[in-house]
Image: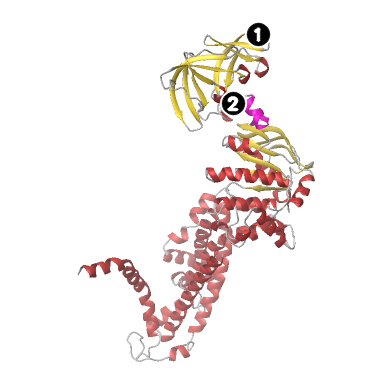
Amino acid sequence: MSRVFKWIREHLVVLAGILALAYLVLPNLVVFAFSFNKPVGKFNYEWAQFSTDAWTNPCGVADMCGSLSLSLQIATLATIGATVLGTMVAFALARYRFRGRAATTALIFLPMAMPEVVMAASLGTLFLNMRIQFGFLTILIAHIMFCLSFVVTAVKARVMSMDPRLEQAAQDLYATPTQTFLKITLPLAAPGIAAGALLSFALSFDDFIITQFNSGPTTVTFPMFVWGASQRGIPVQVNVIGTAMFIAAVALTVAGQWIGNRRKARS
Amino acid sequence: MTEQLRDAATAGGDVRLTGIGKTYGDFTAVHPLDLTIPQGSFFALLGASGCGKTTTLRMIAGLEEPSCGTVLIGGQDVTALPPYKRPVNTVFQSYALFPHLDIFENVAFGLRRRGKKDVKKQVEEMLDLVELGPFARRKPHQLSGGQQQRVAVARALINHPQVLLLDEPLGALDLKLRRQMQLELKRIQTEVGITFVHVTHDQEEAMTMADTIAVMNSGRVEQLGAPAELYENPATTFVANFLGQSNLIPAEVTGRSGEDLLLSASGVRLAVPAARCTTEATRIHLGIRPEKITIAHASETVPDGRNSLTGTVSDSSFIGVSTQYVVRSEAGQEIAVFEQNMERDTRITPGAPVVLHWNPAHSFGLDAAQAIDAGTGEEAA
């Protein structure tokens, strides 16, 4: 008996870890498993039969790959836009004192704090009153707007923790302001910028509420497609895309870790 | 490598500051000061934190814009030049090594920025000079404090600056390593012959390393001179207290006898050579260093021609090479005495009546208009 307790005591942390991991990963595993299902009827909720149909023909569903491509385009552009703008805002807030700095710092958090549906509706109203055609552009503007605060937060934290003497040392060692920025400031801020960009991509790709209020009749993003399809029965291909995204994200994380470890081992 | 550095040094590295000052709004960090640092010297700016020494150094580097005055390096006016165009390099406090670059790239940084090709040989030679050759591919955080410090020196010296600026470069090291690095830096300076300007708050460090020390206090240079000169002949109470330790005894000038001024300190008759008195005032502080005082039991007789004071021992602490006594004098003042542990008189214990005596030529007189406790670190704000 005491041996059992001893074993539990020694492995408690590992057990808890495995349980937490299962909690996080289980939904993904279900999505993965059901991507090989061949459902009977419209709904892919009950296991029927193993099949690789969906994997061999992922674009077999009408409009799905079009919406996926649109989502990827918007996510890419929104990431670039939000990262460039957000990095500049973060540097301005972290490095300079100016009128309205405190107000900017507070307002930049607003999109994070405000209920998404409120922001979505008011943005829609704004676009409508400005007579801007709903479509690709309105979605992109909306996405850049709400991604911005995440980039600013990530980059600002990084810039604040950077020692200003490093840039002074670079200047003391004959680096012009441009060289100092490229050789010292940017590489040091890079982890924060990368974190902000990754967050932006993920947030933009799966945003539904804001997109729903600000899209045009022909601009159906992937989340909108999935929501629309769920009324009639989600095609198995959606599980394929979901699984592919999950694998891509895991691969990216593992690759990042591996590169980091290798760099540490080499140096 | 060292020959090349020496060539750079002989190109002329006088640093001349004329009327240079710095104000931040209402606050004056550095009062306009004139300073000439001769080429090839090891010059220390010494003072407590906030005295303006680092600001002065940063104005030479170009990292701080002076509010007035000019900076000349080797005859060239560099006041308007940005840091990256000045022929000076800085060893920063806590080193400011680039964390994302390895040691080799840190050291090569200055050469690369000036478009030098084939930096490999130079960097390797420089790393050998500071004995860090095998660490070229390590990152700064993998090195110890002392090694990082040497990288910082190598990174600056490889550019053959006319002047090397050191901003509290040893402040982050423990005492033993600091002593070792003091000698190391002094060795490198002698070897390469470049002008070193060293900022420190550690008076022992300044005295060990520098040829010339400028003692700064509240944005002003209090006194300038060789370490021994400053120690033996402090011009102000601040210098007397900050550089080593001094007993300052308030006294009144009562007359003159030959070369000596005759004094009265609460009725006790003392003397000081007139030449060692920096003031004409009649109220002075008579200064005497603790190690120049001889302590004896009250029953002993004092030799002729020496200043003497009687008192009682209020505290004694044995610290190996010497014993430090605090004696309450008959005039009511506490006097510190350092006595070499050669022949200890066992009668001298706390409470014992003693007589203190010293050669008048070892004492000095300062104007009593100054705060008696300036520079002790305990002065009233």
Q: Is residue B224 magenta?
A: yes
Residue depicted at x 54% and y 58%:
B142
- Visible in this render: residue B167? no
Chain under callout 1:
B
Can you say whether B207 is above or below A2 in the image? above
Q: Is residue B149 magenta?
A: no
**Residue B233, numbered circle:** none
Q: Report the magenta residues as a range.
A: B220-235
- Visible in this render: residue B161? yes
Residue A200 lies, in percent from the top left, at 51, 67
Closest to the observer: B169 or B321?
A: B321
Q: Give the crowd class for mark 2: few <14, some 14-19, many >=20 residues within 10 Å.
A: many
- Whether residue B235 sits left or right of residue B192 in the image: it is left
Residue depicted at x 52% and y 82%:
A66
Residue depicted at x 61% and y 53%:
A166
The three-letter code of the residue at mark 2 reads: Ala
Residue A263 lies, in percent from the top left, at 55, 67
Chain under callout 2:
B
Closest to the observer: B312 or A230?
A: B312
Residue that label 1 marks: B257
Q: Quadrant of the N terminus of chain A?
A: bottom left
Specify which label sits upstream in the sequence, 1 or 2.
Answer: 2
Residue A191, quarter of picture: bottom right
Residue A210 lies, in percent from the top left, at 46, 69
SS label for mark 1? strand
Residue that label 2 marks: B240
Closest to the observer: A188 or A42?
A: A188
- Whether residue A12 sits left or right of residue A163 in the image: it is left
Can you say whether A187 is above or below B340 in the image? below
Q: CA distance from mark 1 to mark 2?
A: 26 Å
